Image (tube, rainbow, N blue to C red):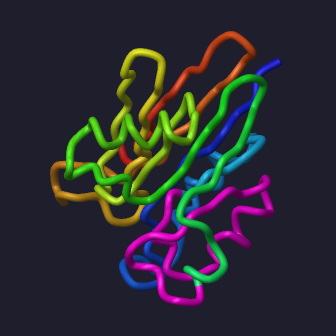
Amino acid sequence: MTKIVGLISDTHIPTRASKIPPLVFDIFKDVDYILHAGDLVQLDVIDQFEQLAPVYAVHGNMDDIGVREQLPWMNKLMIYDWKLGVTHDPGIFFGRGRMREMAEENKVNIFVYGHTHRPSIRWDTDILFINPGSPTNPLPPFVTKPTVARLELTRENVKPRIISLTK
């Protein structure tokens, strides 16, 4: 049996976009869970996604005190024997070694992060590091497209995929 997880980050509603692009809801319509890697800006983003599936979210550096009080810095979810961890800024600019340390400290197999607004999938031995990018504010503009991601998990395998919202 396959479990599907929708991954999203850096939505910045309403500061950098007025709403979540409708295509995101189509892409996530059949997911079992949604992980939001921070910089929501407003908590009602979670309410919208909870209409589709349970949401595991974290606060980011652009979230105000109200969001920070409601959401943790790191959140975790277990699916089969896969332990997923989600955070906003794992210190990516301090190098990948720091990210690996965080993943190992938290005993996660799948490490979801945001902050850079750039999609990325990278396996480091036995840990999957994935950034879904941003569906509303890709950086740098004109180079990176708006994106989200999906994970398909079975007991034996995980299949990550970045999905562009533009052609």
Quadrant position of residue 85: top right
Looking at the image, residue 25 lies above or below residue 112: below
Q: Nearer the viewer, residue 5 or 106?
A: 106
- Magenta stretch prevailing secondary structure: loop
Residue found at the very far top of the displayed protein: 156
Looking at the image, residue 143 lies above or below residue 67: above
Residue found at the very far bottom of the displayed protein: 65
Compared across the picture, whether 120 is left or right of 162 comes to left
Percent position of residue 42, x then y:
56, 82
Q: How many marks?
A: 0
Within the magenta stretch, is there residue 20? no
Compared across the picture, whether 13 is left or right of 36 comes to left
Percent position of residue 57, x then y:
62, 61
Percent position of residue 89, x then y:
37, 58
**Magenta residues, as a range?**
37-66
Residue drawn 38% across the image and 31% down it: 121
Residue drawn 20% across the image and 52% down it: 93
Quadrant position of residue 24: bottom right
Percent position of residue 107, x then y:
58, 34
Compared across the picture, whether 153 is left or right of 80 comes to left
Compared across the picture, whether 77 is left or right of 165 comes to right
Q: On the rendered image, what quadrant is the C terminus found in?
A: top left
Q: On the rendered image, what quadrant is the N terminus found in?
A: top right
Residue drawn 17% across the image and 57% down it: 140
Within the magenta stretch, is there residue 42? yes
